[in-house]
Amino acid sequence: MGKENKVIGRIPISKVWPEVDGGDFPAKAFDGEVITFGATSFREGHDLIAVELLLTSPKGESQRIRLQEGRLGLDEWTTQILLDQIGTWSFQISAWDDEYHTWLHNAEVKLAASIDEELMMLEGQKLLNRLAENAKGKDKKALTEIATKLVTSGSTPSERLTAALAAGMSEIADRNPLRNLETLSDSRSVLCERRLAGSGAWYEFFPRSEGATRNKDGVVVSGNFKSAQKSLARVSQMGFEVLYLPPIHPIGTSHRKGPNNTLIAGPNDPGSPWAIGNSAGGHDTIHPELGTESDFKSFVKAANKLNIEIAMDLALQAAPDHPWVKTDPQWFTQRADGSIAYAENPPKKYQDIYPVNFDNDPQGIFDEVLRVVNKWVSFGIKIFRVDNPHTKPVDFWQRLIAEVNSKNPEVIFLAEAFTRPAMMHALGKAGFQQSYCYFPWRNRKDELVEYLNELAHLSADFFRPALWVNTPDILTTYLQFGGKPAFKIRATIAATAGAIWGMYSGFELYESVARPGAEENIDSEKYELKVRDWATALKSQDTLIPRVTLLNKIRNENPALQQLRNLVTHYSDDPEVLVYSKHIAAEHNGGKANTVLVVVNTDPHSVRETTVHLNLEALGVKGELKVTDLITGQKFVWGEHNYVRLDSFTEPAHILRVET
């Protein structure tokens, strides 16, 4: 038999939000995020309804919040709530017959037309007396007195109604509603996680390159956790909150890759960190050249003192030399000739990596991965960047994340999943707190408008995008051929349009030469050590470091930029001038509204002059805007229509904070 039709309530509630797959999964939120709760609700005829949010916090504290009617004619009701407790919130929507406001509306219309004036006063008296039956204290007395004055005063009905309203009749009635014909929606949940789960600035470096040196024979000597610890100050000074490390485990020797992914490695080539495992150990072991477990703990502690969290890589694959290959060969796929299948993504081949077959001994694999994760959690690691989760079963991740978060709810999992939307979205629903996304390949204005609106308004309930400008695997053609302006443009958009943004080291040095035939840097750190002269770079004026530092400072000082759902795109006459804003209301920001407007020339090769047209209502203002450009410090007066000139070769963007 098919599923029975859902029963429609007396006051229909046809839709509620936030909601993920009919309530099968909780909606996502983070501590301090402003969430819009809403419903579509209506009734027959012309009588009015009231719609309320019944919200219960993780601590079990419940409250009723009146929703406001939204867009005219769409029967939408909404309210915005700042969630300030970590854990699972639950909510229902309540809709009921609003007898008081129905009477008040009818009375005002009829009195204006001199129709049934005394009758409407009698109806009001009767209704207020009913309200008084459920009221207490001063409200009960006030309702009774106002009800009497509606019909006994010597003045006209209009004067009596005006006097009743002046006495606070509507406010008292709203505090003591009858809620007749109340209909409740099904209960839904919102999982509120810690702030870094949904908002933060990430940086990536290879610890083996930090402090790497070249000896007198020209051989590059690996850096380690002690030398990398000195680089933490650089990361902190740029304002980053999370430092992600590619795998720090022993690297396999069999089929080790050489520079630029060549199949032959020399005696001094370190190999790819993602080819995990050799005789020294596997996923629970630190590469000897990087140091000891004690060195790693000291590194994590030093980062934490600078308010930086360390994110570790969780890459569930093995080099041919990994201990798992000997102890648990059933965890891998055996080919017809008896050999173990290595990783392939035709035409790419990864002979140095064996994928794990999760359908072979799933319980054994789960127990081992859980053990590994828990070990690093015990070392103070609270964030894992998961390599290629889309090549593993979704149900495995759902189970693993739920198990880890049940004991350590502060642990965050980032999905490195550049794949089909259905899989990326499923991973978000399964529990991944955030995910890489297609942002690197959305470069034109029209692409960005469409994609940013999708991220902010269509998928935000279950998919948290991290806007990374580059990674060791990604050097887009935009960056390859856009010159230095392209780097400034992409960093500006990533840091202000998303709530989470990330950058891989070298971006601030404008590294833009690609390996022929690949969308990644030549001489990639994935396959070799890289010696960078950071001392000289930090002194140079020819780096992106000042801009990155400024962007993170602007983010920290403007709470509106730390949210995603509040993004609104505006219109410009130019096909390459992107305009968007973010606004947070005063009641959600310590009594002071915060509004930021960003205008960016997305063409790195041009000077653009155009008119920008603003949706002033979305900015939370009326009339003129006094704005300060947070990049240059200049002050302007803007209105609904504004002329801009953006030169990509000097300054391609405005980041304008609304001052009034």
Image (cartoon, helix red, strand yellow):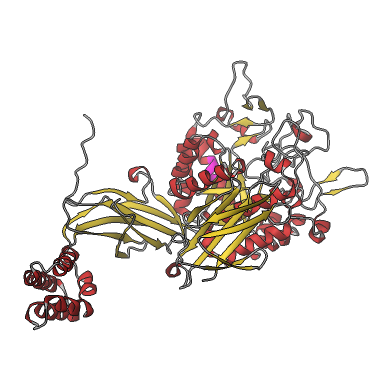
Residue 550: x %, y % from top left? 67, 62
Viewer can see residue 499: no
Residue 617: x %, y % from top left? 43, 61
The residue positioned farthest toward the bottom in the image shown: 154
The residue positioned farthest toward the top in the image shown: 337
The N terminus, quarter of image? top left
- The residue drawn where x is 71% and y is 56% is 295
Residue 265: x %, y % from top left? 80, 32
Residue nearer the viewer, 392 or 547: 547
Residue nearer the viewer, 342 or 534: 534
Residue nearer the viewer, 493 or 429: 493
Q: Is residue 411 above or below residue 264?
A: below
Res 69 quadrant in image: bottom left
Res 327 quadrant in image: top right
Viewer can see residue 427: yes
Q: Viewed as shown, does residue 509 lie left or right of 462?
A: right
Q: Is residue 91 above or below residue 624?
A: above
On whether residue 65 falls in the magenta region, the answer is no
On whether residue 370 falls in the magenta region, the answer is yes
Q: Viewed as shown, does residue 606 lie left or right of 429?
A: right
Residue 386: x %, y % from top left? 57, 43
Q: Would you say the magenta stretch is mainly helix, strand or loop?
A: helix
Q: Is residue 535 above or below residue 435?
A: below
Bounds of the magenta segment: 368-372
- The residue drawn where x is 56% and y is 39% is 417
The residue positioned farthest toward the front in the image shown: 113
Q: Viewed as shown, does residue 48 lie left or right of 260?
A: left
